[in-house]
Image (cartoon, grey):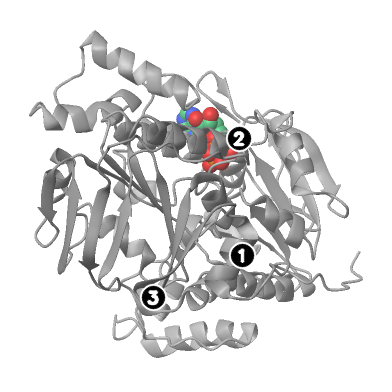
């Protein structure tokens, strides 16, 4: 697959067997999503490519109607559901048919079609509920059910492109239980993910891409560790980041105080973060920990609370994002596609936007050498690939977009840096770069708050972790902070269970 002069996939072959979960891994920008897009007709591959499903060759470029009849479906990043639409609407979007006589959508028929799939899955989900009101495991069920509509048992292929990225541990276990049932019928699953733990636990075989080429094709996973997969992806072992050291809190520097913050879920939350310190917030879905970043940065309305920083007192009720930025608070939100970046603008424009906005020069072309140097510096520090400041952000790979989002706010030199899931969807190498960059910002005197659900990330990043339940801080962890200790505090279930108990499938 070539874009202009860039060859993004080089003679890549991949075979997913009936009845297997096949992992597809590789660093950010290695070509995973591009491959999925070739399989679903979004990209036209170079001449010579071949795509076959259940033994039948497809005409290229792949046409959406044809892959649907062949039972190929994709579940996109973060499940790809419309939160305000009902379950049945989400299931049937793109498939709704109007009755010939009444010229109206026959909701009775649509509901029956949706019900049939849920029955096949043996799961009950309220059809009329808006998806945003469902539990996380129910949302995962809806996303899988939607993909399964065109798949007949024993045939077809479902591609999950980073779809598990926002799921918490219990929802993940539920997700993999359903996948197990699906592959047990003989349907094939291609699992694109950055969570190597999922591949080790849940996949049967794995294909590894590096720089657009296959470095391991269909390798059996038995006996393979996460460290082995990392080495295959990167072509080297990672330097151990685990020795975090202790926070270097500048003597005499006043801590940032976050007091009595109350929002939709968070209730009366108070904690302090010293300049130089990284404080993690975590908990189960719905516990309120993930509201806090948005409440303390003016991105969602707080009903009460105050932030004290740099000698100023900032009431949170009525705080606007721009007032928060002026006060030195930077928010790196989750889900960069929707809330963090201007996809049609260049890397330079995105990184310098907060600065030009602050200086009242929004949207003017950036010419000044200082700004160019700043962008070049951040691209180097975060290893953004390709290192081309004029690249349109929408054409960067997902993980590189995440780095640009981080650069955009770090370049502003905030007093309080607030992050939500900062390493979601980035590869292990990039995760290390991002973790090191955030810790360097703390080292330079920034107070950092990071809300996240990934125990490995929290253990690498944080000096302390606050565990939430029912909108309040229930527990504070400090010291060693092993991933197991964090999981134990969240779920109180002891050590982690594998995500999938492999069935004896006996399929060939
Ligand atoms: N439309 C496009 N035009 C030009 N280059 C593109 C386009 N789409 C993708 N690329 C380039 O192709 C390469 C592979 O990108 P792709 O999105 O497939 O990576 P990925 O492995 O899915 O990465 P990530 O894990 O970060 O999502 C990247 O270098 C990206 O910049």
Instruction: Tell me which numbered mark, 1 or 2, is placed earlier along the sequence.
Output: 1
Q: CA distance from mark 2 to mark 3?
A: 34 Å
Residue at mark 1: C-beta within 8 A of ligand 1: no
Tag count in the figure?
A: 3
Name the N-terminal-most of marks 2 and 3.
Answer: 3
The answer to whether mark 2 is within 8 Å of ligand 1 is no
Residue for point 29% across, 82% down: 104
Can residue 34 be seen? no
How would you rate the neighbour count of disc 3 (Cα within 10 Å): few for under 14, some for 14-19, many for 20 or more?
many
Residue 343: which disc? none
User: In the picture, residue 483 is in which quadrant?
Assistant: bottom right
Check disc 1 and report its element: helix, strand or loop: helix
C-alpha gap between disc 3 and disc 1: 26 Å
Q: Position of residue 311 (x, y in %)?
A: 14, 42
Residue 235's x, y, as percent? 74, 29
Question: In this figure, which residue is indicated by the disc labeled 2?
Answer: 429
Which residue extends farthest front?
Answer: 252
Q: Where is the N terminus found, in terms of image quarters?
A: top right
Camera sees residue 295: yes
Which of the two discs, 3 and 1, sits closer to the camera? 3
Front position among marks 2 and 3: 2
Residue 317, compared with residue 308, is above or below; it is below
Residue at which label 1 appears: 69
Q: In the rendered image, which residue does mark 3 sit on?
A: 131
Q: Give the image quarter of residue 253.
A: top left
Say left or right for 388 vs 372: right
């Amino acid at each position: 697959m070539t874009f202009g002069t860039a060859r993004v996939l080089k003679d890549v072959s991949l075979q997913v067997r009936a009845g297997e979960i096949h992992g597809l891994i590789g660093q950010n920008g290695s070509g995973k999503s591009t491959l999925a897009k070739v399989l679903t007709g979004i990209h036209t591959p170079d001449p010579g490519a071949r795509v076959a499903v259940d033994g039948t060759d497809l005409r290229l470029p792949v046409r959406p109607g044809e892959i649907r009849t062949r039972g190929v479906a994709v579940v996109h990043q973060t499940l790809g559901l419309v939160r305000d639409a009902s379950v049945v609407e989400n299931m049937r979007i793109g498939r709704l048919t109007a009755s010939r006589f009444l010229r109206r959508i026959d909701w009775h028929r649509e509901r029956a079609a949706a019900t049939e799939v849920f029955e096949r899955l043996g799961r009950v989900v309220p059809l009329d509920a808006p998806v945003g009101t469902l539990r996380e495991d129910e949302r995962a069920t809806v996303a899988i059910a939607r993909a399964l509509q065109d798949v007949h048992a024993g045939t077809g292929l479902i591609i999950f492109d980073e779809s598990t990225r926002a799921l918490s541990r219990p929802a993940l276990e539920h997700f993999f239980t359903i996948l197990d049932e699906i592959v047990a019928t003989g349907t094939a699953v291609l699992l694109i993910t950055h969570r190597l733990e999922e591949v080790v636990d849940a996949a049967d075989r794995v294909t590894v891409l590096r720089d657009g080429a296959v470095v391991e094709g269909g390798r059996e996973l038995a006996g393979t560790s996460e460290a082995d997969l990392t080495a295959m992806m990167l072509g080297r072992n990672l330097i151990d980041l685990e020795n975090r050291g202790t926070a270097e809190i500048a003597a005499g520097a006043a801590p940032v105080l976050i007091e009595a913050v109350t929002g939709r879920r968070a209730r009366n939350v108070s904690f302090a973060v010293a300049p130089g310190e990284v404080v993690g917030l975590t908990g189960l879905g719905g516990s309120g920990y993930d509201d806090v970043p948005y409440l303390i940065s003016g991105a969602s309305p707080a009903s009460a609370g105050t932030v004290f920083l740099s000698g100023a007192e900032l009431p949170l009720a009525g705080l606007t994002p721009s007032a928060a930025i002026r006060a030195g608070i930077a928010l790196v939100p989750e889900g960069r596609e929707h809330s963090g970046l201007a996809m049609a603008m260049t890397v330079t424009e995105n990184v310098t936007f907060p600065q030009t906005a602050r200086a009242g020069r929004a949207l003017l072309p950036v010419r000044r050498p200082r700004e160019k140097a700043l962008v070049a510096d951040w691209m180097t520090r975060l290893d953004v690939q390709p290192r081309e400041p004029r690249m349109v952000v929408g054409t960067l790979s997902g993980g590189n977009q995440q780095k640009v989002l981080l650069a955009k706010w770090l370049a502003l030199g905030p007093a309080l840096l607030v992050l939500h899931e900062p390493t979601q969807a980035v590869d292990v190498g990039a995760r290390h770069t991002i973790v090191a960059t955030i810790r360097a910002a703390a080292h330079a005197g920034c107070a950092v708050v990071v809300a996240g659900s990934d125990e490995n990330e929290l253990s690498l990043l944080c000096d302390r972790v606050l565990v939430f339940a029912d909108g309040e801080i229930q527990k504070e962890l400090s010291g060693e902070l092993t991933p197991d200790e964090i999981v134990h505090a969240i779920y109180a279930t002891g050590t982690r269970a594998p995500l999938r108990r492999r069935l004896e499938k006996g399929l060939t």
